[in-house]
Image (spheres, rainbow, N blue to C red):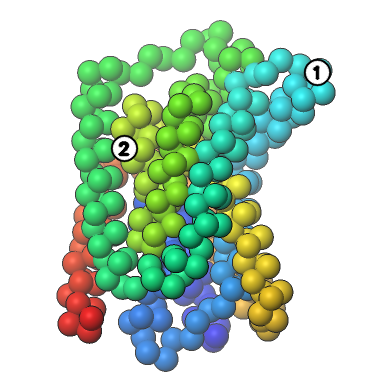
Amino acid sequence: MTTLQTIILALIQGLTEFLPVSSSAHLILPSKFISDWPDQGIAFDIAVHVGSLLAVVIYFRKSLWLMTEDSMKFAFRKGPFTRAAELLFYVMVATVPVGLVGLACKNLVETYLRSPLVIAGSTIVFGLLLWAAQVYSDRFWKKNPLPEVSRQEKDNGTSALSSEITGAAASREINLVRAVLIGCSQAIALIPGTSRSGITMTAGYFLKLSPKAAAEFSFLMSIPVIILSALIKIKDIIANHENVDLWSIGLGTVISFVVAYLVIKLFLDFINRVGLLPYVIYRVILGIVLFWVFWPQS
């Protein structure tokens, strides 16, 4: 790949990994629209996903530290099972469905579900479902406004993460049933065009999570998913003896990290002020364009 192609793909990954628009679809589309656009290769895919992973880990570093620390204390019987430890448990539970389905359906997805028409259909269908979830959530929270977090809850580390720490909303609102159902919805995102963040936030909205809690839990869930995906792809690299372009990998990782970090920071504030409708409109328009361009070729 050229340096320009590396920059474009890294920007795409950083911008779309945590937005409800499907990063996998957007990484596939350049080669579909441009005939001489080379396949970026498995190693580059891993690199830009690692960049996104670093962004979410650093952004949620305080939550992740508390979740890990409290879980270790509980495991060695040196502390109670706090809400921080419980949140880590729910993130891992939510990862199980996508891990099982991903291993079982890997060949199916890569062979039959990467076509532009599949991406077009899933982009529109799950975009409209996201809009329905937004409408449902708006109506629910208008009738049932969130209570203010009491000072006692802010200071009580055993009940929830401190409200000043990113991840506190998810810590207060998530439970086992919600974690399992959101985890099952995440498995659907293996279909390109669905969007992992989009489908998990859709499920979260229908399960009456607040927009902030749904987004936070979706971002936290991305950590084990990206790690699992990277490990599977590393296995493919070893099996295929793929050549590695260190310049493209290094540049792609850095750009993806910077852009993804900014997206997370801005997105959490954006959905609280504006909601998800702009992404729904974008998805519908993109899907229509894809159908218009690629339907005659089918």
- The quadrant of the image that shows the N terminus is bottom right
Side of 265 relative to 250 (left or right): left
Residue shown at the point (22%, 49%) measured from the top left:
128
Residue shown at the point (65%, 40%) measured from the top left:
61
Estimate the x, y position of residue 83 in percent, counting from the top left. 60, 21
- Which badge, 2 or 1, is on the more N-terminal residue? 1
In the picture of the structure, the residue carrying the numbered disc 1 is 77
Side of 284 relative to 238 (left or right): left
Residue shown at the point (36%, 86%) measured from the top left:
34
- The quadrant of the image that shows the C terminus is bottom left
Above or below, 120 against 183 in this view is: below
What is the residue that sits farthest to the bottom in this orientation? Answer: 36
Amino acid under label 2?
Arg
Above or below, 72 against 53 in this view is: above
Q: Is residue 75 visible?
A: yes
Q: Is residue 267 visible?
A: no
Q: CA distance from mark 2 to mark 1?
A: 42 Å
Mark 1: give few (<14), some (14-19) or many (20+) Cα within 10 Å.
few
Estimate the x, y position of residue 140 in percent, counting from the top left. 25, 24
Disc 1 element: loop
Residue nearer the viewer, 17 or 117? 117
Amino acid under label 1?
Arg
Estimate the x, y position of residue 50 in percent, counting from the top left. 62, 60
Residue shown at the point (66%, 80%) measured from the top left:
240
Disc 2 element: helix
In the picture of the structure, the residue carrying the numbered disc 2 is 273
Mark 2: give few (<14), some (14-19) or many (20+) Cα within 10 Å.
few
Residue nearer the viewer, 48 or 116? 116
* Circle 2/circle 1 CB separation < 8 Å: no
Estimate the x, y position of residue 60 in percent, counting from the top left. 60, 40
What is the residue that sits farthest to the top in this orientation? Answer: 152
